[in-house]
Image: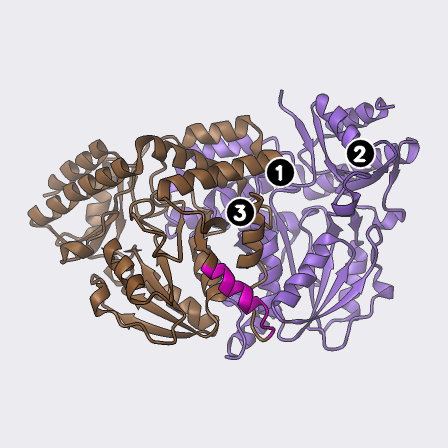
Chain colours: A brown, B purple
Amino acid sequence: MPQTFFTPGPAALYPTFEKHLKSFVDRQLGSVSHRSQQYRDLHKFTVEQLRTLLSVPETHQILFLGSASEAWERILLNCVEHESFHLVNGSFSQKFRDYGDALRKYTHTFEKPMGEGFDAATISAPEYAELICTTHNETSSGVQMQVADIHKLKNKYPDQLLAVDMVSSAPYPALDYELVDTAFFSVQKAFGMPAGLGVWIVNEKCLAKAERLKKNDRLTIGAHHDLPTLWKFAQKHETPATPNVLAIYILGKIAEDFNRIGVNQMRKETEYKAGLLYNFVRKHSNFEAFVKEARWQSQTVVVANTKMDSPAVIGKLKEKGMVIGSGYGEFKASQVRIANFPATSVEQTESLVKAMEKLG
Amino acid sequence: MPQTFFTPGPAALYPTFEKHLKSFVDRQLGSVSHRSQQYRDLHKFTVEQLRTLLSVPETHQILFLGSASEAWERILLNCVEHESFHLVNGSFSQKFRDYGDALRKYTHTFEKPMGEGFDAATISAPEYAELICTTHNETSSGVQMQVADIHKLKNKYPDQLLAVDMVSSAPYPALDYELVDTAFFSVQKAFGMPAGLGVWIVNEKCLAKAERLKKNDRLTIGAHHDLPTLWKFAQKHETPATPNVLAIYILGKIAEDFNRIGVNQMRKETEYKAGLLYNFVRKHSNFEAFVKEARWQSQTVVVANTKMDSPAVIGKLKEKGMVIGSGYGEFKASQVRIANFPATSVEQTESLVKAMEKLG
């Protein structure tokens, strides 16, 4: 029996995925040279669809990496000479910071407990931090940062670069790229694809910084996927190394599907489905939202404390063909995580809520 | 009309590719958690099939990266503190060296012109080079290094680490991993898959070196995909970040198909088909082998000078449903490159030769 995945990544595949995969195979795109016009057209199409979907201006390039984790490394290597500043409130924002340490950057941290979020007003960025690293959606705890707070943060610190991890939320956050220097996501979350591709959106300010750092021979900005090289190839709709053509093709097709629906409509639907899920956990005595403050409650990954044993909850739902995620790390047995991505419909979300209501 | 790709990568897809892709979709493996037993079993299967196919001993781990280009970077970051030594005779061996420069290593180079190869006897490795970088098959020029010479080189310099780029030849070279510290390939060449996955084979000596370098806080071994972290996760059949599960699954299935045929049989067939191609270019007045010395003639990428305009050759074959590659870089218009990977059969190779004979 096919199962419906409400897991926070890898997640349910978008309903059109199989159709696009078939057309990739039928058109023999797996064998096409990545230095051919056919590839360049495909690459350009995907970038244009993403540009439309996310309202990315021409000041920003859209680049392809092996994963969003790779984006952490590339951003830190290319945009930070000495110091970065990290807002940490869960495992993934912490990994972004840990990458900074491993790359021998001096990392500043403003840390909050799991389940809590950040408001611009309470953030004070160190003077010498060259890059401020934010996480729009902390997948481990289900905490989001309000887009308005991300924008306020940049207005507060216009001279520092601002990075937004939107791995498990894009295309939901309506970021204004006038106020975001770089952002990134992976395709196995809200785009409903198998894992294996990271998307890196990055502006000319970051490029200028990387070009400056590249000239410093006491420092490396990396060799594979360094920003100036990626940018140069992107201008001709190519990548420096042979890319994951399959994923780039399908991403373009799914972004086109999203554009047909319209990103505003998709965002409204995301909020409506999130409402169904938060409403349920609020009402049901066996569950409660882990994130208390409504403004910090993620619209794309709903995390709930369970009074019942969470593996039992997960097991019972699985029998009904619905797969939800366990809590992250220390919360593995006491929480459930439910992804609310475009691939799961209103009807499927309603079915999940009904099945959870019947658990007892 | 479906075309037969004799291009050196992306290349023809292996005949079983579609079947395995379908089973990936049918089994909903695109949504499976990379922290689940189901994923660990899949990962373990692929590693075991590759271990069997390539006779990789337990002293070596088999790791997954975004591409083989990424392997260049990871090897240099993790295995070189100060100095590396590169045998350069084409664009890809040169890129390996360029990565060393970009990572601020001191790179030594022994360079030969395109079309020429290396014998162990004439190679003199600098005393302080920590790593010797060889390319088994230089995809740009169709030059191979004899496996026996690779082994002799290690015997000559047992205290230096030895790396083998076998991007466009694995599983053809019968490497003895007692004499190879690290090797790597990508899946869009002889494994007949779409691009998007690099495979990194690496031993405990490299790990020990990386662990030592990691303790040096004036140096970085990278943050994403650093060797100690990759190794730790590999021991539990996982990857640090969400991997390209689709490619890892299909690679395991194709490696299993290869093991059913037997690697020795596959190598013989490769040599037989290479013989057909070299025999043709030797006999035909419009073509000649670019690589003159038989011991350096690649068995997996045959490069020929053309007296006819090479774009015309490529165009005429394309009309007959056969796609061959152009020359690389400056040789684009004067050479053709013909991949000889397992995905193209003896019959298809014979058809290609016949079609080329008829060109005039």
**In screen coordinates, is A325 left or right of A216?**
left
Image spot of residue A47 (x, y percent) = 47, 41
Q: CA distance from mark 1 to mark 3?
A: 15 Å
Observer-nearest of A114 and B184: A114
Q: Which mark is residue B46?
A: 3
Q: Residue A28: percent from the left, percent from the top?
A: 58, 29
Disc 2 marks a residue whose amino acid type is Ser
Of label 1 and label 3, which has the lower sequence position?
3
Q: Residues within 10 Å of mark 1 (few under 14, many from 20)?
A: many
Give the residue at mark 1: B192
Q: Of helix, strand and loop, which one carries label 1?
A: loop
Q: Which residue is painted at 89% across and 31% down in the image?
A: B286
Does residue B238 appear in the picture of this structure?
no
Q: Marks 1 and 2: same chain?
A: yes
Q: If you read the primary sequence from the N terminus, does the residue marked by circle 3 or circle 2 appear first?
A: 3
Circle 3: element type: helix
As drawn, the label of residue B310 is 2
The answer to whether the residues at label 1 and label 3 have Cβ atoms under 8 Å apart is: no
Image quadrant where one finds the C terminus of chain A? top left
Give above or below for B248 relative to A143.
above
Is label 1 or label 3 in front?
1
Q: Amino acid at mark 1?
A: Gly
Residue placed most toward the observer, A53 or A247 = A53
Q: Could you tell me the amino acid type at mark 3?
A: Thr
Q: Chain of mark 3?
A: B
Marks 1 and 2, Cα distance to the nearest angstrom?
A: 25 Å
Which of A323 and A156 lies nearest the eye of the viewer? Answer: A156
Q: Which residues are magenta?
A: A205-217
The crowding category of the residue bearing disc 3, from other C-alpha atoms within 10 Å (few below 14, some 14 to 19, many at least 20), is many
